[in-house]
Image (cartoon, rainbow, N blue to C red):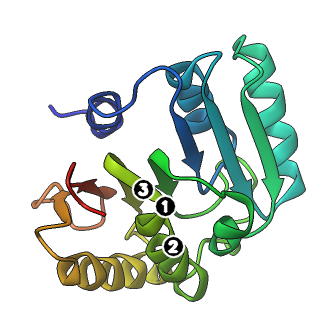
Amino acid sequence: MIDLLDLQKEFLLSHIREGDDLADFTMGNGYDTVFLSKAAGESGSVTAFDIQPSALESTRENLRRNGCPDNWRLICASHDRAAEFIKKPIRAGVFNLGYLPGSGNKALTTARRTTLPAVRAATELISPGGVLLVAVYPGHPEGEAEGRELAEYFSSLSRFKFSVTQIRLINSPESPFFFVAEKNERAE
């Protein structure tokens, strides 16, 4: 059986090199931030976003507990404000949509009003040869709507600039799925 998390990491690692600048647009408890920090190494950087102070605390603890290099910056702001904080191209970016796992607050989730502008901005931040990975959780109404809007947006991107793939279990419509948007090496 395919492990979607392992597959996501394979896609990311096929693009990331030590020293790259990366972004975790939805840090949550910091598992993606830890992965990105280690992949970027001492000479790289990771900028991570979340609107919940508890997510920053959890992520900071997770980074330290996992012995990550001091290459990360945690920002308490919505992911749709990323361009205010990231001023140079990034090699890879990750969105893991939904709610903060373990928070007990399933009412506070990512939402279309910020997710779509954030993903649009992220596609502009990705450097040629880079990748944007967006994990979607359609098991709740907002997640389902996010998935539909993201599919429409990614379908609109020029195939000469991006190659976009959707990875989904077709016999389990409420299971998480993800998009991989790979920017062409020659894209400007």
Kindly indicate the quadrant of the structure image that contains residue 64. Answer: top right
Q: Position of residue 13 (x, y in %)?
A: 34, 28
The N terminus is located in which quarter?
top left
* Looking at the image, residue 19 lies above or below residue 129: above
How much space separates mark 2 and mark 1, taking CA atoms?
Answer: 6 Å
Image position of 77 with respect to 116: above or below: above
Q: Name the side, left or right, on which 119 lies relative to 37.
A: left
User: Which quadrant would residue 32 be assigned to in this image?
Assistant: top right
Q: Looking at the picture, how far across and down is residue 75, in whole percent?
A: 81, 53
Instruction: Please count the marks in the image.
Output: 3
Disc 2 and disc 3: Cα gap in Å? 9 Å
- Image disc number at residue 125: 1
Instruction: Report the front residue among 54 and 119.
Output: 119
Q: Earlier in the sequence, mark 2 or mark 3?
A: 2
Q: Nearer the viewer, residue 111 or 129?
A: 129
Residue 148 lies, in percent from the top left, at 30, 83
**Marks 1 and 3: in contact by CB < 8 Å?**
yes
Q: Is residue 58 above or below residue 157?
A: above
Disc 3 target residue? 126
Q: Position of residue 126 (x, y in %)?
A: 42, 56
Name the residue beneath numbered marker 2: 121
- Residue type, label 3: Ile
**Which residue appears at 51% of the width and 62% of the height?**
97
Q: Secondary structure at mark 3?
A: strand
Marks 2/1 in contact by CB < 8 Å: the verdict is: yes
Q: Give the crowd class for mark 2: few <14, some 14-19, many >=20 residues within 10 Å.
A: some
Label 3 to label 1: alpha-carbon separation: 4 Å
